[in-house]
Amino acid sequence: MKVPLFAGVAMLAAVGGLAFAQQSAAADTKSNGAGGEAVTVRLAPENKSGESGTAKLTSQGDQTKVEISLKGGPKGVSQPAHIHEGTCAKLDPKPKYGLENVVDGKSTTEVPVSLDALLKEKVAINVHKSGNEIKTYVACGNIRTSSAKK
C-alpha cells in the first residue's frame, strides 16, 4: 500500500513541475514578444525630488517606444519629459526629442528614431518638475547600451 501512495505523490509532483515549467516559458515568450529589442534606463532623482523609476525603450523598427514609470511624483501634475543630448551631468538644455508629459508617474511616446541610433548617441532622458518650473529637473537617466544590463 505504501508503493501506490508514493507513486501518486511522485506523479502529482511531476505534473506540478510540468505546469510550472510551462508558465515560466510563457512568461519568457511575452518578454521577448513582437515589440523587439528593449533597453531599460534607470531614472535617478535630481534636485532632492525623491522621484525615481525607469524608462523602457523598445525597438519599433525606425521608431522607439519610450515608456516612463516614475514613483514619488506629485499626483495630477503634468511633468514635461524629453530626450536631450549630453549626459545627466551635462545636458544640452534644448530637447532633441519631445516625450509625452509624465502624469501620475506614467508616460508613453514613440520617437522618430531607431533604438540602435539612440544607443549610438550620447543622450539622456530628463523629467522636469512642471511646465511652470521647466528649469528644475526631477529625474534623469543616461541612455546607453550598458543600461540594459542594470
Image (spheres, rainbow, N blue to C red):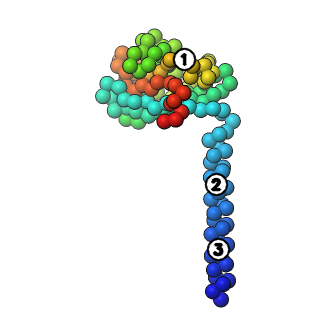
In which quadrant is the N terminus drawn? bottom right
Residue nearest the viewer, comparing 98 with 5: 5
Q: CA distance from mark 3 to mark 1?
A: 55 Å
Secondary structure found at label 1: loop
Q: Where is residue 63 shown, x and y percent of the image?
A: 64, 22
- The residue located at (63%, 80%) in the rendering is 6
Q: Is residue 142 above or below residue 5?
A: above
Image position of 13 (left or right of 140): right
Does residue 113 appear in the picture of this structure?
Answer: yes
- The residue located at (66%, 44%) in the rendering is 29
Image position of 121 (left or right of 48): right
Mark 1 and mark 2 lie on one chain; the one further toward the N terminus is 2
Residue nearest the viewer, comparing 90 with 106: 90
Whether pointer 1 and pointer 2 mark residues with C-beta atoms closer than 8 Å, the reply is no
Mark 2 and mark 3 lie on one chain; the one further toward the N terminus is 3
Does residue 108 appear in the picture of this structure?
Answer: no
Residue type at the position of mark 2:
Gln
- Of circles 1 and 2, the one toward us is 1
Secondary structure found at label 2: helix
Image position of 33 (left or right of 45): right
Mark 3 and mark 1 lie on one chain; the one further toward the N terminus is 3
- Of circles 2 and 3, the one toward us is 3
- The residue located at (47%, 21%) in the rendering is 124
Q: CA distance from mark 1 to mark 2?
A: 38 Å
Q: Where is residue 5 shown, x and y percent of the image?
A: 64, 82
Q: Where is residue 45 shown, x and y percent of the image?
A: 37, 29
| Residue highlighted by disc 3 | 10
| Residue highlighted by disc 2 | 23
Secondary structure found at label 3: helix
Mark carried by residue 121: 1
